[in-house]
Image (cartoon, rainbow, N blue to C red):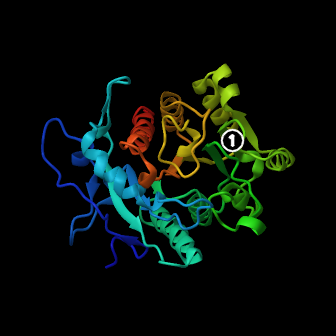
Amino acid sequence: MNYPYPQLDRPPFCWQRQSTPDPKVSDWIQTVEDGSSVDFTSIDITVLGVPLSRSSISASGASETPMAMRKLWKSFNPYHIEYDTDLTSLSVLDLGDVKQHVTDIGKSHQYIKEAMMSMRKCHPHALPIMLGGDHSITAMLVKGWKESHPEQKIGILQFDTHFDLRSLEDNGPSNGTPIRNLIESNTIDAAHVWNIGLHGFYNSKSLKEYADSKGVHYVTVIQARKAGITHTVKEALKQLSKEVDMIYLTVDMDVLDIAYAPGVPAGTTGGMRTDELFEAVYTAGSHPLVQAMDIVCLDPLRDVGEITVKAGVHVFLNFLTGVANRK
């Protein structure tokens, strides 16, 4: 039998789980044991590593992120004191990583799409969280969801410094084109995209004009701060929930100011603070229509003192805190 289905490899790094009344995240998140079958009916959340960064416009070590985040799970408790939330109420399973071809990006993308399709077939009730990888993976994951649920309208909630609407003719299926890829493949409607976090001098006027012509919704950092981060995210969720059947959350870690996230391929000044992003993902996680999430464009090889990887684990756990508080 393929582990646990053909597109996946076992996690490249696993902690030995300890039985303790005060577990760490590494003790709480389950893995598939050698030779054992998994009762997926008891799993609430699946974690999937997507270690692809060859499709990044700028040089990127984002393929190292899934392993880097797993290694830091031992430094975090599954309890959020600010929300008084014990995450061990959720059953979380680390599925491992999507297989990647050494040189063929197209084949790697196909594996990613098929992995999402297998997840929707084998455990459709579980909410998948993907640890990228660069942002090109989002288009493949959403396409896999759409192929599994062709009747559903999919909304995109994107926290990002960039539109990610570059031309496919010029850039191909790269980390600069995932949203345009989804729009032009008719996987999603452009009007069902909400991007929060744009700022400064990091997007061209032509991309803004393309977004406007297609009806993409976007909120800059300054606008979000003036309205309030929680209010801004709730408004996006409110509008999307009127028009779509599910919402896919994608978090590009370069939405953070470089002071908070030195370990990203395209670091910028003037971005979000970590507390703002944590608040945003908690709010998104609290909404029942948010049924999948990814974290992308985190580069551990550029990081300083694990600042950005720790922020990525925080994003992951804050989203799960929102999920845990849905009830």
Mark 1: secondary structure: strand
Q: What residue lies at 51% left-to-right and 68% top-to-bottom? A: 112
Please name the amino acid that badge 1 sits on. Answer: Trp
Q: Nearer the viewer, residue 17 or 291?
A: 17
Query: For the point 34% across and 70% down, which residue is it?
Result: 4
Q: Residue 323 in the image: state x and y as whole percent.
A: 44, 38
Quadrant in which the N terminus appears: bottom left
Residue at left offset 26%, top offset 36%: 77
**Residue at point 33%, 73% (across, down):** 3
* Left or right of 210 on screen, residue 104: left
Which of these two is toward me, 110 or 62? Answer: 62
Residue occupied by mark 1: 194
- The front one of 239 and 53 is 53
Q: Is residue 87 left or right of residue 173?
A: left
Q: Quadrant of the C terminus?
A: top left
Vertical placement of residue 260 versus 65, above or below: above
Whole-percent x and y of residue 294? Answer: 51, 51
- Left or right for 216, reference 287: right
Question: Looking at the rendering, which quadrant does residue 36 occupy?
Answer: bottom left
Visible residue check, residue 198: yes
| Residue 136 figure quarter | bottom right
Using the image, determine if residue 88 lies above or below residue 85: below
Horizontal and vertical percent position of residue 50: 46, 62
